[in-house]
Image: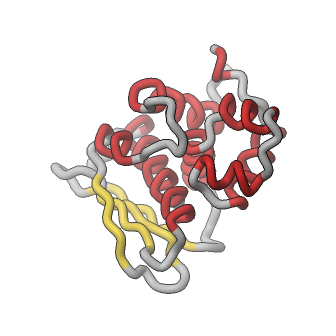
Amino acid sequence: MPEMVYEAARRAAADLLRRHWDGHLPIRLSEISESLNASKYEADLGGTLSGMVSKTPGSGPRIALNSRHSSARRRFTWAHELGHVVERKQLADDPEYSFTDARGAKYDLHEFFADEFAGSLLIPADELRRLRNLGYTTGQLARTFGVSVDAIDKRIARLEVHPDELAHA
Ligand SMILES: [Zn+2]
């Protein structure tokens, strides 16, 4: 059976965590970002954009994050943009692309991949399960993983739809 989009996104995140995560929370994105040759900067992107990523031939991907947003939101956006980088690299090895992310923008499989990747990268299923079993509240989980409460809720919902079997594969 061909791999589903969410499976490909989770596998890509798990591969990066295996190579670049020291086991501490919150997960640091800088090393993972560097391993993908991506650079990141923050700028005032206005009231609607959360971030963007673009790549031109011969240079690494450049990720912009909205400096107006909280650090928790910027982290998720950063991971989401890395998801676009990973997907482009895996699927097409594109030398050139760009994605712009705004609230309420068109949602397609590229956006789904990037969100699933970001949730899997920042909130590993095993860790989430372990901390929930210890009785952590959603707010405590959000602080521990360095993401918003909304990101925790979405990750839990995604894992209810598709339980994570890859973690033990
Ligand atoms: Zn996106």
Q: Residue at x 46, y 50 (%)?
A: 84
Q: Position of residue 79 (x, y in %)?
A: 49, 51
Picture quarter with the C terminus: top right
Q: Residue at x 53, y 45 (%)?
A: 26
Instruction: Reply above or below: 54 against 94.
Output: below
Q: Position of residue 72 (x, y in %)?
A: 55, 62
Q: Quadrant of residue 135?
A: top right
Question: Is residue 2 among the parts visible in the rendering?
Answer: yes
The residue sitting at 66% across, 16% down in the picture is 168
Of all residues shown, which one is farthest toward the left? Answer: 58
In the image, taking residue 19 as reference, residue 59 lies left or right, namely left
Image height check: is 148 above or below 33? below
- The answer, for residue 109, to whether it is visible in the render is no
Q: Position of residue 66 (x, y in %)?
A: 44, 73
Which quadrant holds the N terminus? top right
Residue in the image at 63% along x and 31% along y: 7
